[in-house]
Image: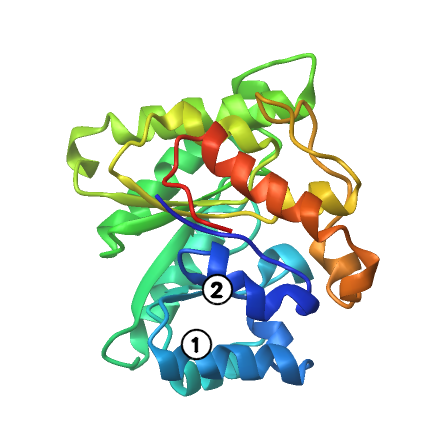
Amino acid sequence: MKVSHEVPRCLLTMSADFNDYDYCLPHLLDIDEDYKQYFINARDTGRYVIMDNSLHELGEAYDGDRLMYWINELEPDEFIVPDVWMNCHQTAAQAKHWLQFKYPKKTKLIAVIQGSNKNEAYLCANLLYDLGYDKLCVSYGATWYNDFFPHSNPDMGKALGRVRFVQGLLQLNHLKDLKLHLLGCSIPQEFGWYDNNPQIVSIDTSNPVMAALDKIEYEEFGLNYKPKANMNGHFDMEFDELDYGSVLYNLNKFRKINNFKTKQL
């Protein structure tokens, strides 16, 4: 799995040392000059870029015209087309809508599985696959994960619920060529539970960085609860406001916990 961690502005230039690729939140391109310049440089130096649609940060996908502008400007390797939170049919309609446009030759479209329960989510995956999307994203935060895998710890239940959903998805014979991107996580050790399944090719999560901002260093097994810090509240922080040693510790521990290839940090 290729790994990328979202970081505050002050860590952007350093993030190339510990990220396997760059994960772009397009709404920040329009409001932050340093962020925009980082991704222009990423384009010019040939770094692999996945562009999100900023649903998680904004509550709805970013403006369509601005998304198209930045797709053409940055030519990301992959673009996550707009989706609608926990709504199967509206997400499938959006995925179909975004197929009509012309994109840079190198840009691959990927879509997000949504639904209000596991059956709708499985239906959504099939609808998206039938539209021609052979790489799909699975969010970490769907509330129905806790119904799918009840647990006294809701964060643990979400992680285990997604694992169970993904396992079921990848057992469907007609989806044997499907590739997955996992969006975020509740607890960092979840990714190790997939046993490096080759169909899961990329993930993004700010978890190790946000834990450090909460002054939490990972245990040997990971964490029992999701950190409270989030990117929306910490993007503008200054470097001297964080403990970079704890950030690096968590980044290294994240890879070790999940049996990912380590990086020299």
- Label 2: state its secondary structure: helix
Q: Residues within 10 Å of mark 2 (few under 14, many from 20)?
A: some
Left or right of residue 126: residue 237 = right
Left or right of residue 39: residue 218 = right
Mark 1 — residue?
42
Q: Residue at x 70, y 27 (%)?
A: 225
Left or right of residue 129: residue 9 = right
State how the image is colored.
rainbow
User: 71 or 102, which lies in front?
Assistant: 71
| Image quadrant in which you'd find residue 240 | bottom right
Q: Is residue 25 visible?
A: no
| Image quadrant in which you'd find residue 159 | top right
Mark 2 — residue?
16
In the displayed image of the protein, which residue is found farthest to the front? 264
User: 168 or 89, which lies in front?
Assistant: 168
User: Is 155 above or below relative to 128?
Assistant: above
How far apart are the two marked residues, 2 and 1, measured between alpha carbons? 9 Å
What amino acid type is highlighted by mark number 2? Answer: Ala
Residue 13 on image: x %, y %: 57, 70
User: Is 42 above or below relative to 140?
Assistant: below
